[in-house]
Image (cartoon, rainbow, N blue to C red):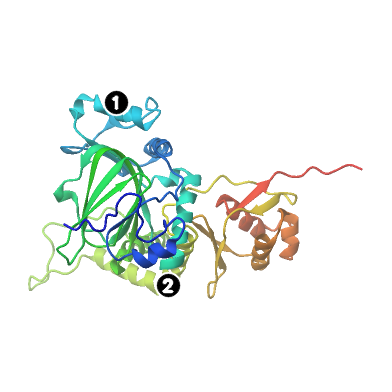
Amino acid sequence: MNASAAPAPGHDPSGSAPGQDWRRFAQAHWAREPVVVPGVRPLGLGPADAHALLRAAIAAAPPRRVRLATADGWLRDPGPLLPGPGDPDPAGYAERLAREPRLAGDGWLLTVGDPLSHDFALWSRVRDVLAELWRHVGQAPLPVTAELAVGDRHHSVEDTAARTDAAALTWVLDGELTVRVRPEHTGTEYALRARAGDMVHWPAGGSHLDHRPGRCTTLRLSVPARTTSALPLVADVLADLMRDLVRERPDHPDGQLTLPHPMPSGPDGRLSAPPRLAASVALLTDTLAGPGPERALLMRWAALRSAAGLDPAPPRRAAVRFTPRHRLRRAAEIVRLPREGGPTVWAANGHAWEARPAGADAVLARLRSAPRAVTVAELAHTARTSADDPELLSLLGEAYRARAVTAAPDRPERRS
């Protein structure tokens, strides 16, 4: 076992915390070997924030993203063991579980997948931290997922630690965490001990086991790092396009897929592919032949780029009906991606949309350079169109819903 990658507490072998100098972290540690980097507090996320985020995520997240493990394994239905209104802080929640008869005084671990999408402010903080790292190692082209975990006296068992194709960045927000990392193609095992304020990193490949000697809260980001990691995203895009194509083709069978029994065969006894599967192959071929996949992947990439890869993004906010006197100010970076043979794509805060007005580029330049808020009427003048142009209002409306711009109420007219 190699413990050399776990520096003494308070000592940073890179000479600087990555929150202050991601360049040193990227050069010394990123994608090289497992390491603990002490003294990292770039997220602005403490135990109380994490507890509030857990409660919000549990209330809104699908059940499959919320898991509670005990010494005997994952509970199928944790029910009242999850934090609720009666657990105002993490200490109170831990004390309640310590008295829970179902746990018999054993340790436990609560994990929630994709928790940040329920809090835009916290999601933005983590996104900005990732954006700083990508400046030195390159933009992650695939979704970066987050997992928030809080546990007490819990360790993962050997047969649950599968090899992963994602690099990991784990911030210890509270308590102490020990991670045993086994990189692929090597017999070396790293024992990484981290305390509150530390960050643990290991490259893609290999497996890991977590141990929490006491109460501990962590936020782990998984960064896909293999070519095959792109396949699920591409498959999802193609599946969506194929469903759209089916709706456009009423002659294409779209009912429940059942096959006759026994399967029909030819005179020589040979079986052929069922017609429904052959039709799906033809549908996939038609989908790939059209412009849909490239357009959909570009939109997805634009959204991910504006989110520094952090996915999923918080949902869009409710729309506002703009008038010519509404005053808009840019509040976030707006990514612009040109598209050959189609409208330019805009993206912000993990959402992408098409910029169809002819003067869209002029509007974006004005939003980027304006030292003050500008009215819809002024932006319309910049785009050489009217303030009630539906395409312009749609463009600005999408920017507002994606939180790329703020909108102030109409300024009342002054009377002389």
* Spot occupied by residue 224 in the image (x, y as percentages of width and height): 33, 61
Name the foreground residue: 263 vs 186: 186
- Which residue occupies the foreground of this view, 407 or 383? 407
Mark 2 vs 1, N-terminal side: 1
- On screen, 405 above or below 300? above
Horizontal side of residue 411 vs 92, given as left or right: right
Residue behind mark 1: 96
Q: Relative to the observer, which residue lies in front, 340 or 76?
A: 76
* Residue 80 in view in this figure: no
Q: CA distance from mark 2 to mark 1?
A: 57 Å
Q: Measuring 21% from the left and 35% from the top, which residue is drawn there?
A: 107
The residue tagged 2 is 290
Furthest residue toward right:
416
The residue depicted at 37 percent of the width and 41 percent of the height is 61
- Residue 65 can be seen in this image: yes
Q: Residue at x 14, y 50 (%)?
A: 159
